[in-house]
Image: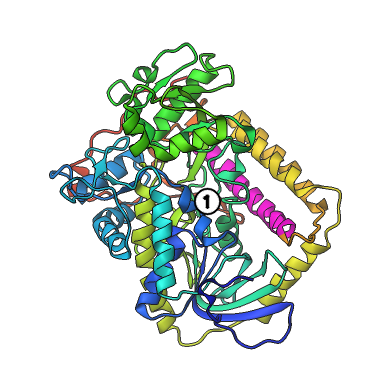
């Protein structure tokens, strides 16, 4: 059990060595950028906060974000504005983003950058001191600030340093298995265990902020690392009484590496295309003119991913089933200063010098654009006292996420949700608890630990990844999705006979069993919503429904009890709508 900053945790005394009782005003689940930003806001507001996570805080998923962070600072293009940023975001969401959410993020983005500067973030700057900004795909102006091609890593370091200054307690070996709600469905904390020694944690809290990421690890080739983004947020929210919105809308990043197998899906940053990288198929042809002749490699991620997929599917791929991304024509100095992480990664993984040779890539599951259903204004959920932020939440991205928008989202809503949770906690007249709910959480872990069946958890996780890759990847169809659901039924039946065996290395096997539950729930929600969305829109490509359906310009909301329901999207404000061009489908799937 490792507490950051060597601080005494907020503990209510309990001498039972197998269970520790902790108490705080607000519990944050997740030590990535969104969780830390919310915790910083809470601490600066003077509210007690505890942050828990299953990865070391310095190695949270945010640290992998490479390309940059968006804000209409107008440092490079004075004519840019937050309204244009909002228009670009809504247009490229294929009209599925929540307008209020988009307005909040884009109008507050500059403040988010100022917060990072205040915390000591080392942005790249022009010679006169202005923050540098570069183009990312589908942006009208240059509004992506960056730090080399390791922007997320620097943001994570900056937030960790600020959290340390504020002496925020962080427990980064905790795995949360259940959010606790009382008899009226109101949050009163969470339950979990320590990954190292199995100690149980009963955490009482007035409010819980869910910042535990998305579900893209349930595909075979993914930019997420092992044991992260397995759908934890989805399961925790749903089992507490929440719902999911648009789980079928998953962004496949165009450029994940293919080899070595244990690193398949590792991202080559969009910055490589932003700096002038060229895509070629296995025949050596530059092919983006067939899919977006105006923007070429700077097209949207969904369109570039589909282009790569189509070239490979139609037999014009590389021998390993990919395409080539070539930056070797760029000056070496540009590569070493603007793409240092890409250069280092390829050297380490493949002994490939990108200043001389092209990179073999293929689409990779990258980002959950749907997530937990939240209110636009404060990201509260259906469950009183429960909030969701970052990739765990939904509303900003719709059917296509602009590169650079996820990092600014976590800063803006980290602040907003931190304040909302602090206000909720302060106004709570009393905190009711439920002995029955705690008993269920305890028994749940005991039951999993007692499981001694023949089914291997890792094998079942792999089976889910294979099902999702084969039937719910870049291109989908009714036949494939129904096959996927049938396969998932069979996998869930096998899950009743798993074996769980903690050992001297810790209780990670227990965590894998809960990861499997999360993956199965996330997979079912994704498959059922993808089946209902009988159209092609943004990242969601249906070979049997190749065009957009105006009737499906809605959000799809999923819950186990009610299945998939349609939710209307509020109108876009006139001042933003006036800045939007038509959402073109040129280059989209037409067969």
The structure residue drawn at horizontal position 52% and vertical position 55%, both measured from the top left corner, is: 59
Q: Is residue 420 visible?
A: no
Image coordinates for residue 115, horizontal then vertical, percent:
29, 63
Q: Nearer the viewer, residue 499 or 535?
A: 499
User: Residue shown at 36%/72% (left/top)?
Assistant: 419
Q: Residue at x 57, y 21 (%)?
A: 321
Give the residues in magenta: 508-534
**Quarter location, residue 148:** top left
Q: Is residue 180 visible?
A: yes
Which residue sits furthest top? 283
Q: Where's residue 445, x and y in %?
A: 74, 66
Quarter of the image for residue 423 reads bottom left
Q: Main secondary structure of the magenta part?
A: helix
In the image, is 572 to the left or to the right of 488?
left
Image position, residue 257 (x, y; %): 53, 31
Name, please, the residue furthest toward the left: 78
Name the residue beneath numbered marker 1: 214
Residue in view at x 54 percent, y 29 percent: 351
User: Which element type, helix, strand or loop, lies under badge 1?
Assistant: loop
525 drawn magenta = yes
């Amino acid at each position: 059990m490792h507490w950051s900053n060597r601080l005494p945790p907020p503990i209510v005394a309990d001498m039972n060595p197998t269970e520790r009782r902790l108490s705080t005003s607000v519990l944050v689940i997740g030590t990535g950028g969104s969780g830390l930003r919310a915790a910083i806001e809470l601490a600066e507001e003077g509210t007690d906060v505890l942050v828990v996570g299953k990865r070391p805080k310095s190695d949270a998923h945010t640290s992998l974000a490479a390309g940059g962070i968006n804000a209409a600072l107008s440092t490079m293009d004075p004519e840019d504005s937050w309204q244009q940023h909002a228009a670009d975001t809504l247009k490229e969401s294929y009209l599925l983003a929540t307008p209020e959410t988009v307005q909040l993020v884009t109008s507050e983005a500059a403040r988010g950058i100022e917060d990072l500067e205040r915390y000591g973030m080392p942005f790249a700057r022009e010679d006169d001191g202005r923050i540098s900004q570069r183009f990312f795909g589908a942006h009208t102006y240059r509004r992506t600030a960056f730090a080399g091609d390791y922007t997320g890593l620097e943001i994570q370091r900056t937030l960790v340093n600020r959290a340390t200054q504020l002496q925020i307690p962080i427990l980064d070996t905790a795995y949360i298995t259940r959010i606790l709600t009382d008899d009226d469905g109101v949050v009163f904390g969470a339950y979990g265990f320590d990954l190292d020694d199995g100690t149980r944690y009963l955490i009482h809290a007035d409010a819980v902020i869910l910042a535990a990421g998305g579900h893209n690890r349930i595909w075979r080739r993914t930019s997420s690392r092992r044991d992260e983004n397995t759908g934890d947020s989805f399961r925790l929210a749903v089992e507490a009484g929440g719902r999911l919105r648009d789980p079928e809308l998953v962004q496949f990043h165009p450029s994940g590496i293919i080899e070595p197998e244990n690193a398949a899906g590792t991202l080559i940053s969009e910055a490589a295309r932003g700096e002038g990288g060229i895509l070629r198929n296995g025949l050596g042809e530059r092919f983006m003119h067939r899919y977006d002749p105006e923007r070429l490699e700077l097209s949207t991620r969904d369109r570039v991913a589909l282009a790569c997929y189509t070239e490979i599917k139609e037999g014009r791929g590389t021998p390993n089933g990919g395409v080539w991304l070539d930056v070797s024509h760029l000056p070496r100095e540009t590569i070493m200063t603007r793409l240092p992480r890409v250069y280092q990664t390829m050297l380490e993984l493949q002994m490939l010098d990108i200043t001389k040779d092209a990179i073999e890539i293929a689409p990779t599951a990258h980002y959950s654009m749907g997530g937990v259903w939240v209110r636009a204004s404060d990201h509260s959920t259906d469950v009183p006292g429960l909030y969701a932020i970052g990739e765990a939440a939904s509303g900003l991205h719709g059917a296509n996420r602009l590169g650079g928008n996820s990092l600014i989202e976590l800063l803006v809503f980290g602040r907003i949700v931190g304040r909302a949770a602090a206000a909720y906690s302060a106004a709570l007249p009393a905190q009711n608890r439920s002995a029955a709910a705690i008993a269920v959480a305890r028994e749940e872990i005991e039951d999993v630990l007692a499981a001694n069946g023949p089914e291997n958890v890792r094998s079942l996780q792999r089976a889910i990844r294979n099902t999702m890759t084969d039937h719910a990847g870049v291109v989908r169809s009714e036949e494939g999705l129904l096959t996927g659901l049938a396969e998932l039924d069979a996998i869930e039946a096998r899950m009743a006979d798993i074996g769980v065996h903690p050992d001297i290395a810790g209780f990670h096997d227990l965590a894998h069993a809960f990861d499997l539950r999360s993956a199965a729930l996330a997979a079912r929600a994704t498959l059922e919503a993808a089946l209902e969305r009988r159209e092609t829109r943004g990242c969601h490509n249906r070979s049997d429904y190749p065009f957009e359906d105006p009737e499906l310009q809605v959000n799809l909301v999923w819950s186990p009890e009610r299945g998939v329901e349609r939710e209307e999207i509020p109108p876009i404000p006139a001042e933003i709508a006036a800045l939007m061009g038509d959402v073109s489908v040129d280059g989209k799937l037409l067969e």
